Image (cartoon, rainbow, N blue to C red):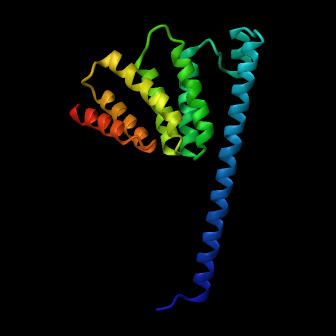
Amino acid sequence: ASMPYGRRLFKRRRKGEAQKESLAMSELNRLISDVYQRQLTELDKAEQAGMKAEEQEAKFGLSSDDLVAMGTFLTQFGKFLSKTGQNLACIKVLKQLVGVQEKFPKKSLELSSAAYKVANQCWKIGYHQEALEFAKRSMQVSQELLGHDSVQVADAFQLLSLVHFGLNDLPEAEKYMLMALKL
């Protein structure tokens, strides 16, 4: 049961159009991320030049002094970059998010979560050494805030285990995996 020539031709054309659409979406995603990254860079420069928070808000729609808004923006932008496969840009944005969370007077689970996101993103693309620092920070903050018996601490131990496995440090990987399994 062969397909008539006209239907085969139509299917090929649709497949080609889908590929073109996919390429167009990838390009659009890159353009969107470039615009937001340039705005973040300009916001940092404006802050360093001494621009007041009100002026930053008027120009960029966001102020570097508003830590909650910056944290929300960086979280959403990091998710966008991760979903669109822009891993290195995502890591850079998530590191900024960790910096924002560290500015809060008290440590919070948001700091632990931000460090976890950086470590996870680094681990996904094989940047194990860089992931190690953030995985440890996530684990330490989670333990300080939640004690040793929480799901978030177990997740941090598990990620730390995977990072050590990626670094080929099998005894440490096993140690942290066993700690995660005990919780």
As drawn, the residue found furthest toward the right would be: 49
State how many labels appear. 0
Query: Left or right of 34: which side holds 95?
Result: left
Please name the residue shown 74% across and 12% down the image. 55
Indicate the position of residue 134 as horizontal and vertical percent values.
Answer: 48, 28
Quarter of the C terminus within the rendering? top left
In front here: 71 or 107? 107
Query: Outermost residue, left direction?
Result: 182
Q: Residue at x 71, y 21 (%)?
A: 43
- Percent x, y of residue 15: 60, 70
Instruction: Name the residue rendered at 58%, 37% in the picture.
Output: 90
- Residue 47: x and y in percent read 72, 14
Q: Quadrant of residue 24?
A: bottom right
In the shown orientation, is residue 151 left or right of residue 78?
Answer: left
Quarter location, residue 107:
top left
Q: Is residue 86 left or right of residue 34?
A: left
Residue at image coords 49%, 7%: 105
Residue 51 drawn at (x, y percent)? 75, 10
